[in-house]
Amino acid sequence: MKIAFLVYNMYGIGGTVRAVANLASGLSAHHDVEIVSVFRRGDAPRFPLDPRVRLVPLIDARHRLWRWTHPSARRSSAMFHDPGPAGGAVPPSRLVDRRVAAYLRRTRADAVIATRPLLVGHLAAYGPDRCLRIGQEHRTLDSHNPELREQMLAAVSCLDAYVTVSEADARAWRAALPAGSGATVTALPNAVPAPDPELRLPGPDQDSRLVVAVGRLIPIKRFDRLIEAFAKVVTVRPDWELRIYGRGRTEGRLRRTIDALGLGDRVRLMGAVAPVESEWAKAAVAAVASDGESFGMTIVEAMRCGVPVVSTDCPYGPAEIITPGVDGLLVPLEGGSDALADALLELIEDPGRRRAMGEAGLRTGARYDPAGLAERWTGLLHDLARRRPGGCAVRRPGGLSAAVAGAAFDAGELAARTAARLAAVRRRARRPRPAAARCTVTEDGSLLIAFEDIPASAASAGAPLDLVLRLRGTPTTLRLPLTEQQPGGRPAALLSRAHHILGEGRWDCRLAPRGTPPGTPAEAAGPPVAARLLDTAPLLTLPPTVDQRGLRHWVPYATADGTLAVRAWLRHAHAEIEQVLPGESGFTVTARVLAPAGRAPGPRPRVLLGPDWDVAVRTVAGAPDRLEFSVDYAEALRHRTAGPDTVAELRYRPGPGRGTVSLGRIGGDIPDRRRTDRYPAVVLRHPEYGPTRLRPVFTHRNALALAMTDAPAAPAASAGR
């Protein structure tokens, strides 16, 4: 059977995209499967697809001027309003209407599955009678606004089937559909694959102190409730940390909540990560605080990584997945943040119970394996095909323009579009295809980079290959030979923590034939390395290396375009920040000095904030390598220099006449602390420069600094935070 999934943007990150990638890959074992992405917003999808799945984009939106090559892209869609895409970077347009309609008229698929309301409307209007027309609900009926709900009910009535991800939502759809609707409504949960078999999952000796939550930063996810609950957790267990992965419109509000509760060192907003399995594998507990979940994919993802889940007992998904007390805990919504905090502490305080629930979760998660869900989908498709009635009597839901049906393009638009595509093809042809690799941090902190896919252009030269690391902005390189040291004979390179030293900075990775002269165009033309998987869990507890050669540490990470890079630090000594406590009048810092033996602090150590400004350091009793100091904002204001921004980087001086030592946060698994480690600002008035915002920040080098910037004038009553 030929199956086509209709997706709005398969090149993005989100639950729908992840669910389609998982299901399509599972179905491809026994069916001819293609994914039709209305928009192409990247060179490759962020979630892996089985090689047998074809990905067919309808509109290439990778270049910034794509709208100007398509006049109809600047006219609003005639389909009913779908708030999700309408508020995104590529809102629905007449071009979308025309391309989707044209695809549906020419498709030879036996079944087309539309994955969001807008596309369900198109499928109802233009899906050919010769194929099964199936809608898929990735939210819930109740979550749609009343107008969209009525339009969706009309569209779904014209389909062969509508598939929800929870049985509770399926009942709601069956009750709401008008009498005489020919659509079969059934529930099939999302498919969630097992994590990469080489990813290390939490074991019995895991000492992680991380609570992890994943999802879009939107109101219904109630990450504010989770942050408030965690504020209660850290009063009991101050050594634990909460990480929230995702992005969305409530990020600013969540940061303000973190600031108000003084959790800058305990709660981190990590941004979006894909794939996220390697982050689940670092967690001791997974948390869901939503007011509503259509399914709860993050719950199953955590279970598949052996992580116990604490979730609110919100409508629909979680109660259909979690068996309370066996593989997780369900918290009543009316209990608020207090009940959520109690449930988290219940697991935090009992490692044995966490392990038992994690093992039970592995068994629960296996029920959602793509192979099993593909069988259930196959059964549904065959059943629909056997008892399929005739075509729907109502073929066009209200609100559709007859003009949408036209698929012809005017000559000017066609010429412009063709020229733009040719230019994009030429640009891409000059970029070598990346080599896909997995980067694993070994127990001793070395990096093992194993290659899954090496472009034919790199391998065809016949010469052995080297992994070339280049220090960004310099000609400095390090070459590592690729050897067959992985199971299955995959070529791999080892960056040894004991034998290799990287200069401080960011190192980019690419392949090059062995013997290629360093710094030549031939070396630079080699394919970059795409980070398919990053397993960095050992860095959570592995401190920087300190020996007579100094201090060094590195963190592998994926750049914005998905390529592998390594952030390295190399210093003679360093003061690692353990805690920053902000207040209304200043902030206090606790740090630990990392230096080779024989470099102990001298008398009267100081912290320097400028050429003529320093503060006294207090040593911690019984711990000569630990220090504390405070920075007063009023004093800082007197040292503000001219210009809109002053950023004073802090340096530690062990004693009179001694050189200074960097002061920052380089340990752990986070390559860039500027976004994740944030603290609240205080606004004070400078006599010359006016209102000034002061706050501790981390720089691009992960060094601690005091930022003093212009701030809008505030009423006297609200001056302060």
Image (cartoon, grey):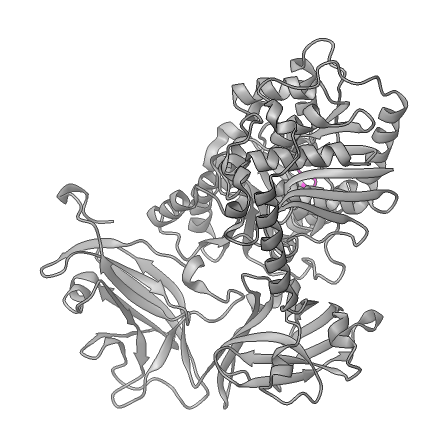
Residue lying farthest front? Answer: 411
Residue at position x 78%, y 49% from top?
53
Residue lying farthest top? Answer: 179
Above or below 401: residue 557 = below
The location of residue 545, given as percent across then percent down, is: 53, 80
The location of residue 616, given as percent across then percent down, is: 23, 75
Quarter of the N terminus within the rendering: top right
Front one among 408 and 423: 408
Q: Residue 263: within the magenta?
A: no
Front one among 92 and 438: 92
Residue 527 appears in the figure: yes
Number of dots carrying numbers:
0
Residue lying farthest right? Answer: 386
Residue at position x 31%, y 77% from top?
651
Above or below 711: residue 24 = above
The location of residue 677, given as percent across then percent down, is: 41, 59
Front one among 38 and 435: 38
- Bounds of the magenta segment: 323-327
Residue at position x 64%, y 84% from top?
479
Residue 363 appears in the figure: no
Q: Is residue 358 left or right of residue 273?
A: right
Above or below 690: residue 458 = below
Q: Main secondary structure of the magenta part?
A: loop
Q: Is residue 635 left or right of residue 496?
A: left
Q: Is residue 124 left or right of residue 65?
A: right
Quarter of the image holding residue 98?
top right
Q: Residue 325: within the magenta?
A: yes
Residue at position x 18%, y 47% from top?
719
Quarter of the image holding residue 618?
bottom left
The location of residue 314, given as percent across then percent down, is: 57, 30
